[in-house]
Amino acid sequence: MADSPDIDPLYRKAPTSREAKPIDATRMAVLFSVMLVTASGNTAMQSILPTIGTQLDIPDFWVSAAFSWSALLWVYTAPKWARQSDHRGRKALMRLGMIGFTTSFALAGLSLFLGLQGWYNAVWTFALFAFFRSLYGGLGSAAPPAVQAYVAARTARANRTKALSLISSSFGLGTIVGPAIAPLLILPVLGLSSPMFAFAGIGILVMIALALKLPNDSPGFKARGVVTSEPYSSAPSSDSLKDEEEENEEEHAVPPQLRWGDSRIKPWLITGILGGNAHALILGVVGFLILDRLGLRGDPEMGIKMTGLVLMSGAAATLLAQWGLIPLLQMGPRMSILWGMILGATGCVVIGLSHDLHGIIIGFAVASLGFGLFRPGFTAGASLAVRRSEQNGVAGIVASANGMAFIASPAIGVLLYTYAGPLPFWVATTVCVFLFGWGFKTLELDDRIISDN
């Protein structure tokens, strides 16, 4: 049987259940750390970059554009790494992802440090930063799907959901940890670039732990890596692997190719793309709005602290929605989207009208709570609309739709903010109100879509 040509070569010599040891606490901690560091480093950078841009006298638009470039690379490369996680080895791709993360943060931090010291002008500083940042978008995206596939391939079905939920939670937790610790990592010698060097050092420690504590691939169960969206503050990824053992279709049949224009998922995609862009608009602007509304352009350390506090409140609200409200209230896809848009619109209005820290925190938390309800609703609705054999296809489309929102909208939002004040928040509010009406009329009722699947 082991020599049968019908069996995937990767699994011809898969160990027996006795040989396929479950993941112990130490190895799970290493995997958790990979996801946590990947997310927290990115959101920590979000909290410090507006202040660094101010110190260098770089227009806010170009500061935001640096994140757009990384998001574009993540959207392009993440599906490729997800497909290769089964063939090149999960541990190898985790190592590649952490190399990209560590190298990106070290070199980007160095470029900012030298620029702040006056070694070259502000244009060269951000050009170099954007170039080195691309290593995170291009290579860092290899780690999350590899971690998920590693866990699924070494975990029995009875424990798989719990294990994958734990791993997914680390990505979300990172969006809180990053902004929270970024101000604490600022050192006198390295200045505002300190957090980036600190996360590069943490990345090296995680790579050492990977090498010493995680065994090479010897899967006991078949599993496939899936695409994970780049982490942004208050927008943690909650993707998980589909359990292939539960599929009823023939294992070796060629899965049908799912198209973006498929009528079953089209309403959900329209909702997801518009809502995602509304979310990206406010995320791109909020850091600069904090500096301006609180008068912190000339106080770098306080600017980073206040920005981190607001971003942290948004991430916490998102996790409350995804970990608490949705399972507690048993909200279906349509209901999650409708309530999400109501809260999202409310939060955007509050942010646009607020001129003190308390109001901005409340508004951003309410908006993040809304978008925290919206994203899982959009994801689940698209997933429930298709067959089991099409789940990998819809997961890739959903992750791409999530990532695409962060390519242009943050920079566009900053451009609107620069010339028209709170206009991005009024645009986001309008989109949320429109999507509430669209969803109420168009999206399939929760009872119907769940019963159909």
Image (cartoon, rainbow, N blue to C red):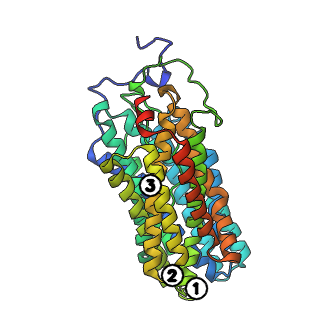
* Image x and y of residue 136, in percent: 57, 56
* Image x and y of residue 154, in percent: 35, 34
- Residue 45, compared with residue 25, is above or below; it is below
Mark seen at residue 25? none
- Name the element at disc 1: loop
Dot 1 alpha-carbon crowd within 10 angstroms: few under 14, some 14 to 19, many 20 or more: many
First reached walking from the N terminus: tag 1 or tag 2: 1
Judging by the rendered image, the residue that carries numbered circle 1 is 297
Dot 3 alpha-carbon crowd within 10 angstroms: few under 14, some 14 to 19, many 20 or more: some
Residue at (33% x, 38% y) in the render: 161
4, 48: nearer the viewer: 48
Judging by the rendered image, the residue that carries numbered circle 3 is 339
Please name the amino acid that badge 3 sits on.
Trp
Task: Indicate which label's residue lies in the foreground, 3 or 2.
Answer: 3
- Within the image, what quadrant is residue 64 found in? bottom right
* Image x and y of residue 94, in percent: 48, 46
- Name the element at disc 3: helix
| Residue 287 visible in the displayed image | yes
- Residue 312, compared with residue 162, is above or below; it is below
Please name the amino acid that badge 2 sits on.
Gly
In which quadrant will I find the C terminus?
Answer: top left
1 and 2 marks in contact (CB < 8 Å): yes
First reached walking from the N terminus: tag 3 or tag 2: 2
Mark seen at residue 303? 2
- Residue 335, compared with residue 415, is above or below; it is above
| Residue 139 visible in the displayed image | no
Disc 1 to disc 2, C-alpha distance: 7 Å
364, 316: nearer the viewer: 364
- Name the element at disc 2: helix
Disc 3 to disc 2, C-alpha distance: 32 Å
Please name the amino acid that badge 1 sits on.
Arg
Judge left or right: residue 268 versus residue 368. right
